[in-house]
Each structure stands twice: as C-alpha cells, then as structure tokens.
C-alpha cells in the first residue's frame, strides 16, 4: 500500500484562511475546509474527513479546518484520468492542474490527460467531454461550464461507467458526480461584501460584475454578496452586470456604469477575468484607487493590480487543494472505496497590507506548475 505524502502546507493553510478572513468578515470566518460524510450535515458544518474510508487524521489543523487527508492507495494502480478544465489558460485551473499532477504522482500509476475549452462555454466544453468519454478513461475530473447544459455529457459518462468528480463548478442534477469539491463560494461572496463595505466606509453605491448566469460558483458568490451587502443600511446595491468572462467586456461595463453613476463607490468582481477587466476599466477612467474593487481569484495580473493599488482586496481560492483532493476522490471511486460526496475548501483574502507575507502569497495562482 502506498500513502500519499502531503506536499502542501496543511496547518498553515487553514490558519491563514481563518485569520485573514477575520480581518474583513466575521461571517466568512466560518469558512474553513470542510469535508462532509454522506448526507449527515449541512454544508460547512462539520470537518469529517477522518471518518471516510481509507483516511487518516492529519491531526495538526486548528478546530473547524481541515487539510488534504492522507489516504492510502494500492501501489499497483494503472488508471487513466482526464481533467477537463472550465477554460484553458486560466491560472485558477492551471493551479488546480498542479494539484492534479502532484496527486497523481504521489499516488502513482495514474496517467493524466488535461483538456479544456477556449472559452467558458458549455457549447465548446460539451464536445470535448464527448470525445473524452469516447476515449474511455477510468475517471473524469471536470469543472462543468453550466449548471444545466453540462449535465447531458456527464450523465453519459456515468452511464458508461466512468467515475465523474466535479471540481470547482457543479451541475444542478445532484445524481451527477461521485464527489463534488469546491470553495465556499457563498461565503466568499459574503466576505467580499464585508471587505467592500469596510473599504467604502459602509456607504455609497456598489455593483457586481459577474461572469454569466448558470455558473454555479459565480452565481453563489453573487448571492452571498447580495445577501450580505443588504445588511448595510447606507450602501445601495445598484445591481449586477455580466462580463461573459472577457476582461474587455468588464472594462466596458465599468465605463458605462461610471457614466450613469459617477458616484459609484465600489465594485465586487466575481472572478479572475472580471476583476482584471474591472481594474482596467477604472484605470482607463482615471479612477483607479478611487473606486475600490474587491475581486475573486489571484492570477498574476490581479496580483500586480493589487500591488499597484488598482485593486484593494482579492478573495483567493485554493485550486491546488481542489485538484489534489479531486484525484484522491476519483481513485477511491474507481477502486470502489467509499468517497466523500462533498468537500468544501476555504479561501484567503489578500490585501496590499498582507500580500508580502509568505503565508498569504503562497496562495497566489500559478501561470505554470514549474514556477
Ligand atoms: O473563479 C474561478 C472559478 O472558481 C470559477 O468557477 C470560474 O472562474 C475562475 O476560473 C477564475 O477565472
């Protein structure tokens, strides 16, 4: 039997998540990694990874948080796994791929193939899924592009006996995916609302720049933000606009919104490309630093914008952990072992004040696994 060595920074990971979030948001402080046993507790209520078959307690994490569990696997595996990214060239999925590749190397006997669409669009991702299914891997790790439109091919994969693990995004049909591993996206939206409220002195007009409706993760971030921002009596939420995952579109939205709302006080941008374009839009309007932006994700361009003062806070996910645990769950499923149906990973908020701290900067996303 082979044990997966834990390459990552387990205890620090969890502690940083809790501490840094507390700076901005009590509500988000509850968002430690949680791993749920089958249908026992509501999301985010219990860390139960040590109860799952084949797991061992790491035993080093603060209460309420959890590291990647240390699992034991046979040393004679021979498995094919395909990772289908939400979109190629996105540092979030590149960092997730690093976790996938490391887990596969640690477990051994796993061949990994990585594919993804050129845009975050189910009409592009579904044909890729169909050809992956035709190639007959043992398992597919996938970030489905749409809560409804992605369900068909994933159902076909399951019908073919392929183990499907959902990483990051999910589909509405709960019968799809033996395991679902994602950030606390609702909690991240809540944290973003609190961070933005603090940055604007809890008053003024704010908006959301989201990707497009039908993406489970960003829908939840918007929802968390909207519910939390409504608790600030002097903040007026003027609504959401959609960037279609195009930085240029996000920048255009900023220009148009500033024309109609010259006193716009702050913006929450729900993902990497939306945030990147939002900052560019403010820069073009000469309003960088004047209208605070809280963005989700931390690709290299966003980190530069944070450093430059063009963005004030980044809610960073842990894509590496999602990918690593995705492989663990996929292998358990292929082996017929008990899987963990839902795993929630936490997030860390980076600001100009804390971004030099290695305990924060370790979560910046990678443009390549060789970095
Ligand atoms: O925010 C991530 C991911 O979680 C989301 O589902 C789609 O956008 C990203 O990939 C960032 O671009």
Image (cartoon, grey):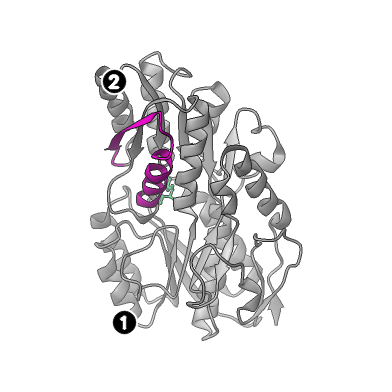
In the image, 97 versus 202, the foreground residue is 202
Residue on which disc 1 sits: 159
Q: Specify few, some or many for label 1: CA neighbours under 10 Å numbering under 14, 14-19, or 20 or more.
A: few
Q: Is residue 344 above or below residue 192?
A: below
Snapshot quadrant of residue 45? bottom right
Residue 185 location in percent, x, y?
45, 52
User: Residue 84 sits in which quadrant?
Assistant: bottom left
- Rendered residue at 61%/45% (across/down): 363
Q: Is residue 301 visible?
A: no
Q: Is residue 215 magenta?
A: no
What residue is shown at x 62% (from left), y 72% (from top)?
49
Mark 2, other Cα within 10 Å: few <14 / some 14–19 / many ≥20: some
| Position above or below: 15 against 25 | below
Magenta-drawn segment? 219-244
Which residue position holds label 2? Answer: 261
On the image, the x and y values in percent for residue 353 come to 65, 28
Position of the N terminus by quadrant:
bottom right
In the rendered image, which quarter contains the C terminus? top right
Label whose residue precedes the other's in the sequence (1 or 2):
1
The stretch drawn in magenta includes residue 220: yes
For label 2, the SS is loop
């Amino acid at each position: 039997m082979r044990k997966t060595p834990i390459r990552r920074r387990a205890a620090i990971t969890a502690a940083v998540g809790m501490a840094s979030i507390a700076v901005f948001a009590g509500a988000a402080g509850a968002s430690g990694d949680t791993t749920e046993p089958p249908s026992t507790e509501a999301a985010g209520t219990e860390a139960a990874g040590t109860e799952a078959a084949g797991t061992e307690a790491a035993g080093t994490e603060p209460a309420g948080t959890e590291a990647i569990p240390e699992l034991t696997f046979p040393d004679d595996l021979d498995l094919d796994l395909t990772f289908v990214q939400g979109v190629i060239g996105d540092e979030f999925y590149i960092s997730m791929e690093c976790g996938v590749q490391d887990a596969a190397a640690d477990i051994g006997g796993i061949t990994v193939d990585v594919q993804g669409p050129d845009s975050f669009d189910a009409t592009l991702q579904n044909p890729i899924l169909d050809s992956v299914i035709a190639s007959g891997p043992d398992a597919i790790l996938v970030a489905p592009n749409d809560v409804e439109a992605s369900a068909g091919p994933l159902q076909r994969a399951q019908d073919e006996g392929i183990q499907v693990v959902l990483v990051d995004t999910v589909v509405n049909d709960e019968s799809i995916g033996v395991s679902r591993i994602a950030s606390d996206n609702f909690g991240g939206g809540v944290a973003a609302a609190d961070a933005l409220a603090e940055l604007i002195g809890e008053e003024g007009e704010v908006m959301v720049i989201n990707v497009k409706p039908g993406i489970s993760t960003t829908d939840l971030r918007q929802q968390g933000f909207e519910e939390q921002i409504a608790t600030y009596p002097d903040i007026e939420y003027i609504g959401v606009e959609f960037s279609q995952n195009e930085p240029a579109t996000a920048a255009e939205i900023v220009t148009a919104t500033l024309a109609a709302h010259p006193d716009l006080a702050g913006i929450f941008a729900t993902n990497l490309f939306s945030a990147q374009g939002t900052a560019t839009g403010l820069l073009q309007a000469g309003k960088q630093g004047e209208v605070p932006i809280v963005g989700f994700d931390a690709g290299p361009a966003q980190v530069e914008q944070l450093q430059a003062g063009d963005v004030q806070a980044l809610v960073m996910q842990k894509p590496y952990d999602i990918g690593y645990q995705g492989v663990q769950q996929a292998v358990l499923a292929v082996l017929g072992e008990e899987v963990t149906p839902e795993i929630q990973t936490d997030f860390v908020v980076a600001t100009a004040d804390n971004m030099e701290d290695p305990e924060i900067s370790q979560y910046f996303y990678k443009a390549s696994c060789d970095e």
